[in-house]
Amino acid sequence: AEFFNEIHHIYKVGVDITVVQCDTSIKSIEPYRGKNEISVLGRGGTEFDPVLDYYNANIGKYTSLVYFTDGECCTRVKPKGNVLWVLSEESQLNESLPGKVIKLEL
């Protein structure tokens, strides 16, 4: 809920958003249309590499990647574009992630 609230506010300013859901592999890729119609899939282990690989392979399609996560993992993939890691309020700051890292505070 915390992440979808942020996604919705980004959407409201006119940004096209594609939601990629991933735990250890990508579970879905779908556009966000401003409603809570997206069911949360997966849960469990965390791997950042599948989403970063997808982003790198589609770099011409996206201007940036905003990765909402608990931050409890690392990556071996270097992103080819801008990445903002948004950590949940309860997460520990993970400064080893490539790109900018922020933590939500409510």
Image (tube, helix red, strand yellow):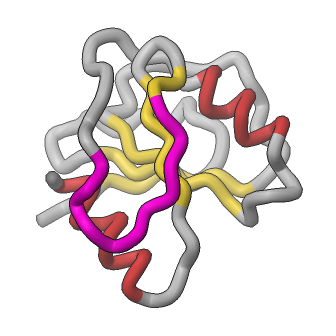
Residue 30, position in %: x, y?
Answer: 50, 49
At a point 18% along the width and 62% down the height, the residue shown is 105
Q: Which span is picked out in magenta?
A: 28-38
Q: Is residue 31 magenta?
A: yes
Residue 17, position in %: x, y?
Answer: 53, 64
Which image quarter is the C terminus in? bottom left
Give the farthest residue toward the bottom: 13
| Nearer to me, 96 or 106 | 106
On the picture, is 59 further left or further right than 41? right
| Nearer to me, 87 or 4 | 4
Residue 97, position in %: x, y?
Answer: 57, 34
In the displayed structure, 92 sits above or below 99; it is above
Q: Count the marks: how many?
A: 0
In the displayed structure, 53 sits above or below 65; it is above
Q: Is residue 98 magenta?
A: no
In the displayed structure, 83 sits above or below 40; it is below
Give the farthest residue toward the front: 37
On the picture, is 63 further left or further right than 15? right
- Chief SS of the magenta region: loop
On the picture, is 15 further left or further right than 68? right
At a point 54% along the width and 79% down the height, the residue shown is 15
Residue 3, position in %: x, y?
Answer: 27, 54
At a point 41% along the width and 55% down the height, the residue shown is 102
